[in-house]
Amino acid sequence: MERRSEAARSRGGGDRRSPFDRFVEQAELRVSQAPFFFVCAGIVVAWLISLPWWTDLKTWQVAIHTVASVFTLLLVVLLENSSRRASEAAQEKLNVIAEALAALLASSAFDDSELRTAAERLREAVGLEERH
């Protein structure tokens, strides 16, 4: 009996990811590289240099805070989505390894009750995330 998580079933075959998931993957790739850091640093430098053109110091400060807040919110959402998918993939891999180990234990446990018990406990542990 094959028990697979929802994440594994959704990856059934081919690239069935949504356009949003593909976008998140590309965004994560881009924001984790040096050019993105330099673009952000350039924005801050441009903001600093722009002080003489602003008539009000508070408006100048609000401008960078607003841009930074909106940008941070969007990045947090994208990176959390990416992190969730990576966690699901890692969990699925661990489940497959545990299932294989349980099958190996079960095949070797014909006359060893401790191995049978260990295999049963391992199979129960694999299903923990589905019960919680």
Image (tube, rainbow, N blue to C red):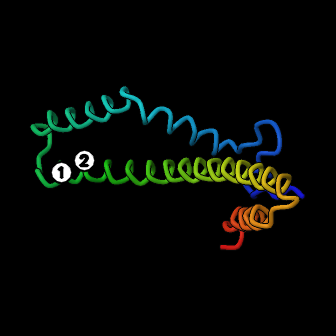
Give above or below for 41 relative to 76: above
Q: Residue furthest bottom?
A: 132
Which residue is more in the foreground, 66 or 7? Answer: 7
Callout 1: SS: helix
Image x and y of residue 7, in percent: 72, 53
Is residue 79 rendered to the left or right of residue 40? right
Residue 11 got which mark? Answer: none
Is residue 13 rendered to the left or right of residue 22? right
**Callout 1, which amino acid?**
Gln
- Dividing the picture into quadrants, the one containing residue 23 is top right
Which residue is more in the foreground, 35 or 120? Answer: 120
Rendered-image quadrant of the C terminus = bottom right
Image x and y of residue 24, in percent: 57, 42
**Callout 2, which amino acid?**
Ile
Rendered-image quadrant of the N terminus = bottom right
Which residue is more in the foreground, 47 or 82? Answer: 82
Is residue 121 rendered to the left or right of residue 106? left
Discs 1, 2 touching: Cβ within 8 Å: yes
Is residue 70 rendered to the left or right of residue 80? left
Crowd tier of the residue under label 1, counting other residues whose Cα lies within 10 Å: few below 14, some 14–19, many 20 or above: some
Query: What residue is at 70 percent from the left and 73 percent from the top?
Result: 131
Query: What residue is at 70 percent from the left and 45 percent from the top?
Result: 18
Image x and y of residue 19, in percent: 68, 42
Mark 2 lies on residue: 64
Image x and y of residue 127, in percent: 73, 65
Query: What residue is at 14 percent from the left and 38 percent from the top?
Result: 53
Crowd tier of the residue under label 2, counting other residues whose Cα lies within 10 Å: few below 14, some 14–19, many 20 or above: some
Mark 1 lies on residue: 61
Disc 1 to disc 2, C-alpha distance:
6 Å
Q: Residue furthest front?
A: 111
